[in-house]
Image (cartoon, helix red, strand yellow):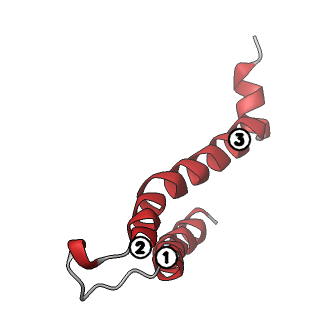
Amino acid sequence: FWTAAERIAYALGPALVSVTLGAGGFETAKARDALTPAALEACRLAMTAGPVCLFAAAALLAIASPAYRALSRP
C-alpha cells in the first residue's frame, strides 16, 4: 500500500503542477521577461500554495489516524 501511494503521489505532483502552469498560460519557450503576469502567478502558486495545501492535508490525515491517537495517550 505504501509503495502504491508513493507512486500515485509521484505521478500526481507533476500533473497538478502542469495543470496549474497551463491554466496560467505558462510557455516554456518564452524568456521570463516575456511571460504574462498570470503565468508568473501560476508559477508562484505551483511552487508555494500547492505544496502547502498538500502538506496541510497530509498533516490532518496523520493527526486523525488511529496510530497517532494511540501514541498521544498517556
Q: Which mark is residue 60?
A: 3
Quarter of the figure that contains the C terminus: top right
Could you say whether the residue bearing mark 2 is in a helix, strand or loop?
helix
In this picture, residue 14 sits left or right of residue 65: left
Q: Residues within 10 Å of mark 3 (few under 14, many from 20)?
A: few
The residue lying at 50 percent from left, 70 percent from top is 13
- Placement of 70 over or under 67, stated as above or below: above
Q: Earlier in the sequence, mark 2 or mark 3?
A: 2
Mark 3 and mark 1 lie on one chain; the one further toward the N terminus is 1
- Disc 1 is placed on an element classified as helix
Which is more toward the observer, 70 or 10?
Answer: 10
- Residue at x 49%, y 76% (from the top left corner): 24
Q: Position of residue 30 (x, y in %)?
A: 24, 84
**Three-letter amino acid code of the residue under disc 2:** Ala
Q: Nearer the viewer, residue 4 or 51?
A: 51
Disc 1 residue crowd, few under 14, some 14–19, many 20+, Cα 10 Å: some
Q: Is residue 35 left or right of residue 53?
A: left
Foreground: disc 3 or disc 1: 1
60 is higher (above) or lower (below) than 30:
above
Mark seen at residue 3: none
Give the x, y percent position of residue 64. Answer: 78, 38
Q: Which residue is mark 2?
A: 39
